[in-house]
Amino acid sequence: MLNRWWQCALLLMVWIAFPVYPQVYPSTGTAWVLPGGWDEPEATSYFDTADAVKQWEGRHADLVLGSMHDATVNQSLVAIGYIYSQKLNCRPGPQTAWLSREAAGRGLDLEDGYLHFAEDTVLAAERLSSGLDYLLEGQPYHLLLVRNDQYSTARLPLTLQPGDALIAMAAYPFDSVQITALQPPQASRAVADAAGAVGDWQPVALRWQSRVGEAKQLIQTGTMAQAGAWSSVRAVYQGRQLNSGKRGLENGLKTWMIRLQWPTATRVHGLQFQPWLTREPGSLAIPGWDGQNDRNGDGYIDDAEFADRANRNASARFRHQARLIPAGHQWPGTCWYRTNFADPAWNQFRVGWYQADWLRQGLSGGYNDDMAQLLGENQFRVTQGGRIAELSARAGTESAATTYAVQQADFLQLVKQRTQTRWLAANISRLNVWQSAVWPAKLRSMVDFWLREHYLHPAMGLTRMQQGWEQFALGKAGDKSLIMASVKGGRSDLSPTSARAWQQDIETGLAQYYFFNVPGLTYYHSWNQTHLYGSGNTTVRNWYRGGVPKNWAYQPTGMLNIDIGHPITPPGGYKLVQWVNDKDSAKTTTTQLGNIALLPANWFWLYRSGWYGVVPNEGVMARRYSDGLVVYRAVKAHDMQSFLLAKPLRVSLPGDYQRVFYDGSLSEPMRYIELGGYEGAVLKRVSSSESP
């Protein structure tokens, strides 16, 4: 009787330690990652329309990392918008457009918002993102045809008649334009009026040179004698928008414009601005900028200044040409510049974007992607140069990464102060922020919520599970987390057309998640093997059949509806799982690992073999819940595909349980379970079998 009294008291203390939060499912919070692109389902009658899928998503998660693309829906749950404080896109988007417009009104230089190389730099880059083609090919931001006083998008090749005008817009100042045509045009550039719009078109003298290109076409290259003191302008002329649907221009992006006209009908096959980046096999060269070379201070190094440069190791003609680009370390199709956190005026100004954008979208905060990818070697492999003008460090070094991380922390602190958000998030995937040499405590303290992208996968193995103590350190600090379970490397890889294989991978993922679940602080998300998110339909490459909504397929709604309660202490008589750390090891019941405070995880072994250290060669670990149990069988190593085919292993359970399947159905009560290799299971306690 006394023992039962202590058990009840312990249960009460657990409920106090883990307060119940309103949520969709009984035993954990759930979340979506970057929903959007809803499709009308093709292979299920559960939904009639794409909007019905969206409404279902709005009802089946407590939190969204991204946006539901509807301010009202965002406000009905916690929506944390996607942000990237350490980059701006090379091809300007809505944020750059907003900054461009607002900076002009405040007398700020947009260029101060970027980091720049102070010397010519060569970066090793085995593979360049196709997004860099925008710069490498000198693509215009927009081309506008003016004909009979009407504006339309110019799509080359195009025949221009006398009286027509071709307006080329660039998101940066330039001094040279290349046109593929039989004859050079007359050129004029836009001059801003007092309101920052196009006030007039000023004729500009270009030195034209002709050459025959690879396609046997004549290429005219026009170079300005003086390209300095040239201001950007808003796309407005005589009260009319110089636009044909370009969103950035609608949002106030200021560009550098040149107007080209031909006295006779001329066929124009192509137009580009002279690129300044140099691509070589396995590398990208970026010129450096040194203000000493600009002797007259007009923002441009003309030919005379270039020939007599004070710093001959800096060859950029314009400051923007020296912006830092993490070449070789960008997502396919993207191109990024690194932002400057060292300018206080710029930081205060840029915070306004988040305040305005979150209010417009009905967002509760923002999650910063790729927070471990800043200025270190994982972003910049420098083979020549690399000194950064705004930092006393070189790109690709631990010093640069650490300094930049502290500056980013200061910036994010401003964001939190201005917006009053309690939902500032970071995507760190599997990174342990206590063990990272370039992750300062100050940056860690700025983050309220952590996205553990692809943190779990079926074949993750015992060692990786036992290295997961940092998740309980985050919980002890009161931080919230989304823990993503993916199917990568699981049974669905071996049998991609098998419904049961996909379902087993998802069952295993939820079981693994429940090992790390901290009620009120963690959120579950189930996904496929890719990093491409959204709410569209499945294909036969990412589900056993195509045409059903992804989130509906991957979230095991039936399983989540089964209440297994909350984590409790292990049963007596079982050996405890130990944490693995570089310097320390400790039982998973511990509240301290070295000098790091933890919440107890309370994992224990149902079976183990090959016990020669902290991690057995093979084992079945378990975690007990007040109304359930979760188990996972694995070997020490991860991604051993052959172990997926291992013979099932029968292990005894600490009581009577029913296995929970993908659809929420339950097995018959049992006192043992058979598990295959790298297989996890969620079990529901039979109420009469055991008192918590």
Image: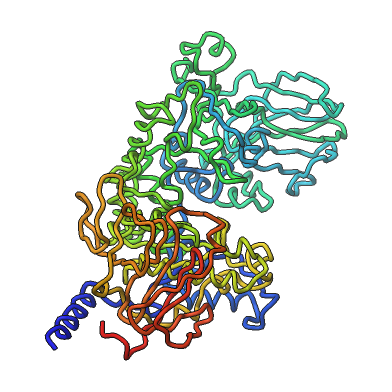
The answer to which of 176 and 185 lies nearer the viewer is 176
* Rendered location of residue 424, percent (x, y): 36, 57
The correct choice, above or below, for 143 with respect to 502 in the image is above
Q: Is residue 293 visible?
A: yes
For the point 61% across and 72% down, the residue is 549
For the point 46% across and 80% down, the residue is 660
Q: Is residue 356 visible?
A: no
- Going by the picture, which residue comes out furthest to the bottom? 688
Place residue 578 in its image quadrant.
bottom left
The correct choice, above or below, for 236 with respect to 136 in the image is below
Position of 199 with respect to 396 (left or right) is right
Place residue 109 in its image quadrant.
top left
Position of 683 with respect to 271 (left or right) is left
* Rendered location of residue 211, percent (x, y): 80, 20
For the point 58% across and 67% down, the residue is 535
For the point 47% across and 63% down, the residue is 485
Q: Which quadrant is home to the N terminus? A: bottom left
* Rendered location of residue 618, percent (x, y): 42, 60
* Rendered location of residue 130, percent (x, y): 65, 41
Position of 185 with respect to 300 (left or right) is right
The correct choice, above or below, for 81 with respect to 431 in the image is below
The correct choice, above or below, for 216 with respect to 688 in the image is above
